[in-house]
Image (spheres, grey):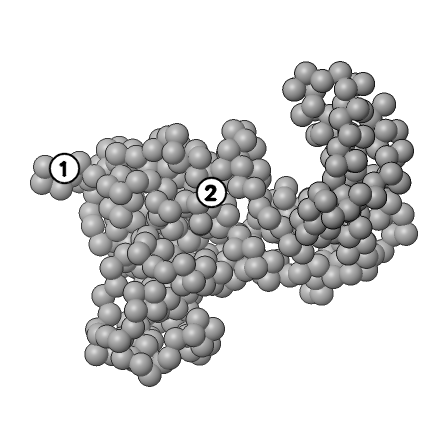
């Protein structure tokens, strides 16, 4: 069963055309990089998989099913701009998330808060952008979600937090059972993390494949390939 | 194991090379345990599946063995280090020769450039000598010349 399957997906917003006929098959159990410049349609694609936006035309399956409340329970979506209640503390945010999703592991979340040096009892309103980015990651990675969709997890975040985020994804990823799709335009820093990559440009997939095979065939880094195709 | 990754080369190949170099110089000895897939993935900020692939290829080559539930170990074979060393050496020599040939040097010129280079670059006494010293620091280089000449011809 595929993690994500898209057949001829179009998405139009009023006048703009965010996705123009996307056909995509993502195998389960991988970390996939969804790479493209700003405005390529990456967020739209992830939101459609998360059930937060609906395709204008075309068909989308997540874990073999139509996108629905059932697939939403198996999917964790990490938005680029977080939606925390600023009066909460990280501890309360974990409890809140636990009340929303039955697959949340609270003790795992508390371990991860410590690992990422976040004070569980500090108000979210006092956290820096990097700290909020780490908190988003804690909440996503401590759910047993089969599909995790992360929208630009590194954007606008300080270098030490970026490194911590990449390390956490690498070590917490449940190899074999979990599929993580990460959209980013910052390929240089993140490319070693991806097993497969999908390059998106102007609402269309321009290239996709296994990351190491693309490197071997072109003798180029993903970052160099990105500059060529996007 | 410290790998300085070149992102234009497959990552799993570089992990394999990192292990093979450590075996070749003796940093990893027969019976030594490799980092777990998860720990190496975290340290290198890379994908656990990629690390797993590198370990599987190394196992297929007979360099490591996986013991169920215990981890991956350098194979306990007395001839392993020597074999891996000659494999790593052959690859390094081949790639150097290919590069020199692309620059259109004849065999004699390549040999000449190597011995000239050995006079200029200080001898490497340890794994870190190459980046720690300047050209002026060390002049001893005569000893290793013979072996390199033999390899080129």
The residue pinned by badge 2 equals: A196
- State the residue at coordinates (87%, 52%): B77
Report the Cα–Cα distance between label 1 and label 2: 29 Å
| Element type at mark 2 | strand
* Left or right: B63 in relation to A198: right
Kindly tell me whether residue B54 is visible in this rendering.
no
Q: Position of residue B113 (x, y in %)?
A: 76, 26
Q: Which residue position holds label 1?
A: A16
Q: Position of residue A11 (x, y in %)?
A: 19, 40
Quadrant occupied by the C terminus of chain A: top left
Q: In the figure, is residue B28 to the left or right of A1?
A: right
Q: How far across and down, in percent of the image, does residue A62 sit?
A: 34, 50
Q: Classify residue A103 by image quadrant.
A: bottom left
Mark 1 vs 2, N-terminal side: 1
- In the image: residue B27, left or right of residue A148: right
Residue A39: percent from the left, percent from the top?
Answer: 24, 41
SS at mark 1 in the image: strand
Q: Chain of mark 1?
A: A
């Amino acid at each position: 069963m595929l993690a994500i399957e898209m057949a001829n997906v179009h998405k139009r917003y009023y006048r703009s055309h965010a996705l123009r006929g996307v056909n995509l098959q993502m195998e389960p159990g991988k970390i996939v990089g969804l790479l493209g410049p700003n405005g390529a349609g990456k967020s739209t694609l992830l939101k459609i998989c998360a059930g937060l936006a609906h395709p204008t035309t075309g068909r989308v399956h997540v874990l073999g099913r139509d996108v629905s409340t059932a697939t939403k329970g198996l999917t964790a979506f990490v938005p680029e701009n977080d939606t925390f209640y600023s009066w909460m503390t990280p501890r309360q945010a974990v409890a809140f998330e636990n009340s929303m999703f039955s697959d949340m592991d609270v003790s795992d979340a508390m371990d991860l808060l410590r690992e990422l040096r976040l004070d569980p009892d500090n108000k979210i309103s006092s956290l820096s952008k990097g700290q909020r980015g780490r908190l988003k990651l804690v909440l996503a990675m401590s759910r047993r979600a089969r599909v995790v969709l992360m929208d630009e997890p590194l954007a606008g975040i300080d270098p030490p937090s970026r490194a911590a985020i990449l390390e956490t994804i690498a070590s917490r990823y449940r190899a074999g059972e979990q599929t993580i799709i990460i959209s980013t335009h910052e390929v240089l820093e993140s490319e070693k993390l991806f097993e497969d990559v999908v390059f998106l440009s102007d609402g269309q997939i321009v290239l996709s494949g296994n990351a190491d095979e693309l490197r071997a065939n072109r003798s180029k880094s993903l970052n160099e390939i990105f500059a060529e195709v996007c | 194991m410290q790998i300085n990754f070149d992102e234009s080369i497959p990552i799993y190949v570089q992990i394999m090379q990192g292990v093979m170099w450590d075996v070749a110089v003796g940093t990893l000895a027969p019976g030594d345990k490799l980092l777990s897939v998860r720990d190496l993935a975290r340290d290198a900020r890379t994908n656990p599946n990629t690390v797993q692939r590198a370990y599987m290829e190394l196992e297929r080559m007979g360099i490591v063995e996986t013991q169920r539930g215990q981890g991956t170990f350098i194979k306990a074979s007395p001839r392993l280090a020597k074999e891996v060393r000659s494999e790593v050496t052959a690859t390094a020599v081949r790639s150097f020769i290919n590069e020199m040939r692309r620059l259109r040097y004849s065999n004699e010129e390549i040999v000449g450039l190597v011995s000239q280079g050995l006079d200029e670059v200080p001898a490497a006494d340890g794994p870190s000598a190459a980046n720690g010293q300047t050209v002026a620091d060390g002049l001893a280089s005569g000893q290793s010349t013979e072996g390199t000449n033999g390899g080129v011809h």
